Structures are given as C-alpha cells and as structure tokens.
Image: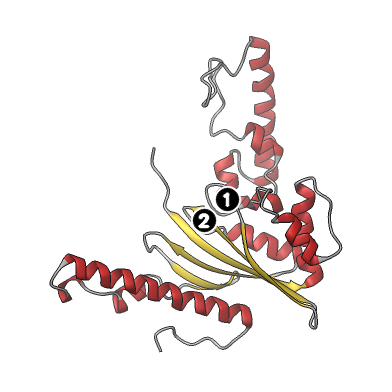
Amino acid sequence: MIMPNWSFNYYAVKSATGNVLNLVNEGLRNLGMETKYNIKDAIESLWDGKNNVTMATFRPIPETIVKYGTIKKMERDATDYDTGEPVFNSDEEYESYSRKYDEAVKYNEATYGVTNWREYNCLVGFGCKWDSEVKLKSYYIDNANGITTIYLDSDTAWSYPYRWLKYIKKTFDLNVYIFAQEEFDAYNLYGEIDNINAEYAEECFYDFAPVREDFDSEDKYGDAYAQFKVNLSRALYSKFQECVNGEELDSIYD
C-alpha cells in the first residue's frame, strides 16, 4: 500500500463569540449532544476527551457518499475487508444494493459533482484524502470585546484541508488561520485561509537551508539541517500567531 505524505496543521478560529458558538454547537448537534448557550461550556463539552471530534463533526459526509461512495461498484462475490465474510448473502441483496448504488452515483454527481468518497473528500468536503481528528489546543474568550479564539490542530493526508477551512469560514462567518508544514517540505505556509503566505516553501530551502558541502560529516550536516527545520517551524508559527493577533508581518529572516 502506498502511504500518503502528511500535512501537519495548526488552526485558529477567531470571531465574534456568537459565531464561534454556532460552530461549536454545530459539532455538538452532529454528535447528538445538547447545544450550549455559553461558549466555555460548549467548547469543553465538545472537546471533553470522550468525543471523537473530526472535520466531519462540523461538515458531515453525505450519507449517499458514506454508503455508496466506493470507487467502483462491488461485485456479487465481494467480501468484507476486515472479516473476510461475504457482503451479500443473496442475489436479492445484491440486486437491491446495485440499484441503490446506481441511483446514488447519479445523485452524487448531480448534487456534488463527484461520485465517490475520495473525490468528495479531496474536491468538495475537506481538500485532503481522509477525514481527520481535530484536537483542541487552547482557547481564549475576550469578554470585553466579545471575541473568542480557538486553537486547533490536525494531521491530514496529501494536503492541508483548505476546502474544509473555507467552508467553516463562510458558513459560520469566521476568521480562520492556518500554519501548515508538509512532512517532506513540499510546502511551509501560514496565513488567513483566503490569504495564504507560502513564499517560504521551496525558496526558504534554496536560500537558507544548510548545504551538505559545508560540513565535514553527515552527522554534522544532519544536526544542522534538523536545527534549520526547528528554527523554520518556530519562525513560521510566530508569523501565524502574528496573523491571528493582527500584527504587522515582516520577513521571517529580517
């Protein structure tokens, strides 16, 4: 099996407290939980350590994609991936599935412009291959100004979840910020989701990364490169925080 590259992401959601409360209550509602009137209660109820909070908690995957969004229609002799047991116990079961599958494919294409789970996740729902756990890092409630900021993180496959971030921004009228690094340095980026700053992706490696020829051993080069990556992460995270706080941004290498 070919494994994906991973994107390591940090998010900040910042807006009027009522808007942030609407986002969190949407998550509670989709988990079948009681919604809250107080933002602190809502956040602590949703991320109570017991719930599996994922991107789909806030943007559920349509049932027609969940049930019938396989890459291709299953055959009559299909077996369950985990148990090895037959999926269909009779011709009638298979015929019913096949009819519903064909209907779902038409519906999904007409409604979402895609026909299977991978296309939906990448092109519609999330912007990455799989749904992912969304962890709460911290939150800050500014009662004086009526603003709440929530810091989150998640690891996503192949890409950062730009479609999901744009969706929650538009749906709940939020300011949404991201700091993301692809594990093999395809990108290093930060900024508000509609104004991503990715100028320090390849450029930072060409201009600032240590060069092998400057070191007399692989160990020294490896240590220097590792420290470079740590410094880069710290600098970009600092710029991410400046975006969230609305501060002036200068080059990370000034």
Tell me, yes or no, whether the two marked residues, 2 and 1, touch with CB atoms within 8 Å. yes
Where does the image place residue 23, in percent across and percent down from the top left?
A: 75, 61
Residue at image position (79%, 71%) is 17
Nearest to N terminus: mark 2 or mark 1: 1
Label 2: few (<14), some or many (≥20) within 10 Å? many
Question: In this view, which residue lies farthest toward the front?
Answer: 49
Residue 112 x/y as whole percent? 66, 46
- Marks 2 and 1, how far apart in space? 7 Å
Mark 2 secondary-structure assignment:
strand
Q: Nearer the viewer, residue 52 or 89?
A: 52
Give whichever of 210, 110 is nearer the camera: 210
- Characterize the local packing of mark 1: few (<14), some (14-19) or many (20 or more) Cα atoms within 10 angstroms: many
The N terminus lies in which quarter of the figure?
top left
The residue type indicated by label 2 comes to: Asp
- Classify residue 204 by image quadrant: bottom left
Report the label total: 2
Q: Is residue 231 left or right of residue 217?
A: right
Residue at image coords 20%, 66%: 219
User: Could you tell me which quadrant the C terminus lies in?
Assistant: bottom left
Can you say whether 106 is above or below 245 in the image? above
Q: According to the image, label 1 marks what residue?
A: 132
Find disc 2 in the rendering and name its residue: 155
